Image (cartoon, helix red, strand yellow):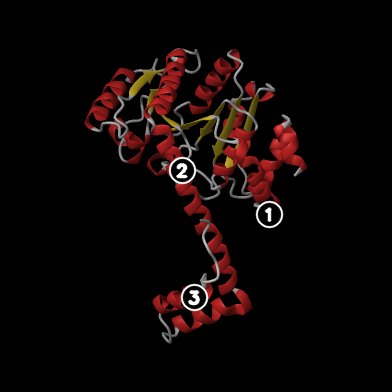
């Protein structure tokens, strides 16, 4: 595809068009991703998550500016709440990064969650590949901040940063459940506020009780994104984690798991689309619903029948 050639040649317009095609689930998007795939796998994927109001966008903007001083190219996927009217992103995160958005070495794209409870839409996984092939050194996926449900980020990020902030009330409640387990680095932003030392202390205590699954001690870093305080230390920790991932073999393990999840996710999506199309053909679904409502059939047997009728894969072979 011509767009793929343009992207590989450095065209940001081509990148934007390809991402739009992915979001719109265009058939051409799949073919473009196949062509781009051999050019992926180089970027450091960084997930940034945490509760609303933690200052994630301001933190991202600071990191972008520092990386650009090192002449690194940075891609940002800012996952915003989905508009209930248009289905698009509300763009709140992008507004906070307006200075960086004019930098030719930075590519920022806002995306909606599209109803995903895990904080990421399915399209994010493919958009990451576009930015990777676009030769971004760092790709930051900043998620919408939906709290304990927001754990999908570990399925795409190499390094997951959980951003907390003092003054959330019950700090322990704010960081329990899945959020605590997904972090590779913890940041307490707005650390100039009252209660910051308490939040840091509680986080460190909880992390001692929940050792990292990779066997690595997790850091808790205080920052003030508005002034830049702590950003240097955070960057050092990000680089240290990247080196650890590569030297320990954890990076390969995580990426293998990601590929596995991606294959299963795509298979699930394709099967769902195929089965829905078959079941809804000629009003079949409504007829089945009528019979179930009348207790002439039961939903369990109907589902078994649908699967038996639509998933005849006897003529297909897996790739050896």
Q: Is residue 17 left or right of residue 219?
A: right
Q: Position of residue 252 (x, y in %)?
A: 43, 35
Residue 42 visible from this viewpoint: yes
Task: In this rendered view, identify the residue nearer to me: 149 or 232.
Answer: 232
Residue 163 visible from this viewpoint: no
Query: Label 2, label 3: how many angstroms apart (C-alpha)?
Result: 30 Å
Query: Label 1, label 3: how many angstroms apart (C-alpha)?
Result: 26 Å
The numbered mark, 1 or 2, whose residue comes first in the sequence reads 1
Q: Position of residue 70 (x, y in %)?
A: 58, 14
Where is 35 relative to 287, above or below?
above
Give the residue at x 53% y 20%.
Answer: 63
Q: Residues within 10 Å of mark 3 (few under 14, many from 20)?
A: some
Which residue, given by chain and number where applicable, does mark 3 sit on?
306
Q: Residues within 10 Å of mark 2 (few under 14, many from 20)?
A: some
Give the label, 2 or 3, closer to the camera. Answer: 2
Q: Secondary structure at mark 2?
A: helix
Q: Is residue 14 left or right of residue 51?
A: right
The numbered disc on residue 258 is 2
Where is 280 relative to 63, above or below?
below
């Amino acid at each position: 595809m011509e767009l793929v050639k343009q992207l590989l040649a450095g065209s940001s317009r081509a990148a934007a068009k390809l991402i739009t095609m992915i979001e719109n689930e265009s058939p051409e998007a799949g073919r473009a991703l196949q062509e781009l795939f051999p050019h992926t796998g180089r970027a450091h994927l960084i997930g940034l998550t945490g509760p609303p109001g933690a200052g994630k966008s301001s933190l991202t903007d600071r990191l972008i500016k520092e990386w650009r001083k090192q002449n690194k190219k940075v891609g940002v996927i800012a996952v915003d709440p989905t508009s209930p009217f248009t289905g698009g992103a509300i763009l709140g995160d992008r507004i906070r990064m307006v200075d960086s958005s004019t930098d030719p070495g930075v590519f920022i794209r806002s995306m909606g969650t599209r109803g995903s409870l895990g904080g990421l839409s399915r399209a994010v996984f493919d958009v990451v590949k576009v930015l990777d092939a676009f030769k971004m050194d760092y790709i930051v996926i900043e998620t919408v901040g939906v709290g304990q449900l927001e754990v999908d980020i570990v399925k795409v990020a190499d390094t997951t940063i959980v951003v907390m902030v003092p003054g959330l009330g019950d700090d322990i409640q704010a960081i329990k459940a899945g959020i605590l387990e997904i972090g590779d680095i913890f940041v307490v932003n707005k650390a100039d506020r009252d209660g910051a030392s308490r939040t840091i202390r509680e986080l460190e205590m909880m992390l001692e009780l929940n050792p990292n699954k990779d066997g690595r001690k997790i850091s808790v870093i205080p920052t003030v994104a508005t002034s830049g305080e702590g950003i240097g230390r955070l960057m050092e920790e990000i680089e240290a984690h990247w080196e650890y991932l590569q030297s320990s073999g954890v990076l390969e393990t995580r990426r293998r798991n990601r590929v596995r999840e991606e294959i299963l996710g795509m298979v699930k999506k394709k099967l769902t689309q195929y089965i829905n199309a078959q079941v809804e053909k000629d009003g079949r679904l409504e007829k089945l619903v009528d019979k179930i409502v009348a207790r002439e059939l039961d939903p369990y047997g109907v589902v078994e029948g649908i699967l038996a009728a639509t998933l005849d894969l006897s003529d297909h072979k897996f790739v050896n």
